[in-house]
Image (cartoon, helix red, strand yellow):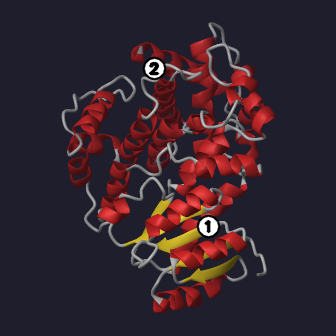
Amino acid sequence: MEKHSHLILFVDDDPFILKGIKRSVEEYDDIWSADFATSGKDALAKLAQHSFDAVVTDMHMPGMDGIQLLDAVSQNMPGVIRFVLSGNTSDAQVLKSTHLVHQMIPKPCDMEHIYTIVERACRLRDMLTDPQLLRIITGIKTLPSVPLLYNRLVEELQSENASAQAVGNIIAQDAAMTAKILQLVNSAFFGLSDNVSSPQRAVTLLGLNTVKALVLGIQVFSEYQGRTNLPISIDALWKHSMLVSSLAYHISRNLKLGTQDQENARVSGILHDIGKLMLFKIPDFFQEVQLNKNGSISVESEYKVLGTSHAEMGAYLLGIWGIPNPIVEAITFHHKPGAQISKKADLVTALHAANGLVNMCQIEKDVIYNAYLDIQYLQNLGMVERLDEWTTMTRELIKNAS
């Protein structure tokens, strides 16, 4: 089989559906090399013969169903990205598979939409060049695929009648999540003047995407909360993420970025260090790296040991979960902002500055910008003169949140 940029396997027991997919995929045959299987057994045979980048499967199939297929793929070919085409995310069979699925694609769905989702995930995966590391990342099962509550929020937002009220109602059905959301919304991290007493009101004030990110962050971080045998503090990591979220939002406003970028700044801050959770899954990693003064991991050590960092790893994971591209890009480059193409102050600028300044102000008594920020990048943008103002903002946030 000729190898193009990415090799994709489509699985469906209905030959007419596969025929339609095959016809639609022809439009992308200069980019994709696609193959097709009419059963789970047939799919596994093809997967054993070729190095596929992704598998896109229907859930309901006789013999070996989609769950059994994905389980086998996750165990035997963990480098393959796993997608499910499903018409109903509340389907009991679909819900049982959430730990096996990197992303669910709603049906009905045109090929252009499928292509955008799958190709984007594949390109993010291509950023990680170490095959062993790639297998670790795509094979992680205990770090959840997109959590169930987040899936339900996404499904609601894709409906024609999406509203803050409806999203709030979904969150309200989970008492623990409601309590956590309200605790955070009423904290100094968000600086809201009103006391917020309902998740519906929280969604109205913060925006749908910010609340979605909070749900995702809370559910993913909660697996590690309270564990005492970890080399870095999860509570400190979560607090750091919330501080960066708040500061990135304020910096984005200071930069006069658009409303969407301001909300994306909050979301990026909440999720920017999610890749650090994946480091716990890499054998002997913490025996080989150096820690910073505050007990955090040195990014330079990550590159030395792994050839990549938590930034790229987290961006890849969030990308295959379907997080919007501007947020994934900001997280990718938050330690190396000069590597991105943009030559103007943007979301990457806000997240890079926020992360560096929070770290500096939490560790140092003095101002040492060079140790925490890409000064050349900020000079090129004409932003260095704003650093003192942003530092004052940072110290005030940390003081109020403590």
Looking at the picture, does residue 261 appear above or below residue 27? above
For the question of whether residue 41 can be seen, the reply is yes
Q: On the image, numbered disc 2 is attached to which residue? A: 397
Residue type at mark 2 is Leu
Q: Quadrant of the N terminus?
A: bottom right
Looking at the picture, does residue 67 appear above or below residue 397? below
Quadrant of the image occupied by residue 290: top right
Q: Earlier in the sequence, mark 1 or mark 2?
A: 1
Pick whichever, 164 or 297, lies toward us.
Answer: 297
Badge 2: how crowded within 10 Å, few (<14), some, or many (20+)? Answer: many
For the point 73% across and 52% down, the residue is 341
Looking at the picture, does residue 33 appear above or below residue 134? below
Instruction: Give how far across and how far down residue 395 sits, in percent.
Output: 51, 15
For the point 71% across and 76% down, the residue is 31
Residue type at mark 1 is Ala
Residue 196 is left or right of residue 304, and the answer is: left
Pick whichever, 401 or 32, lies toward us.
Answer: 32
Instruction: Give how far across and how far down residue 305 sits, in percent.
Output: 78, 33
Q: Quadrant of the C terminus?
A: top left
Residue extending furthest toward the top:
365
Q: Secondary structure at mark 2?
A: helix
Q: On the image, numbered disc 1 is attached to which residue? A: 54
Instruction: Give how far across and how far down residue 301 sits, in percent.
Output: 76, 28
| Cα gap from disc 1 to disc 2, whole angstroms | 43 Å
Residue extending furthest toward the front:
63
How many numbered circles does the render carry? 2
Q: Secondary structure at mark 1?
A: strand
Looking at the picture, does residue 374 appear above or below residue 104? above
Cβ–Cβ below 8 Å for labels 1 and 2? Answer: no
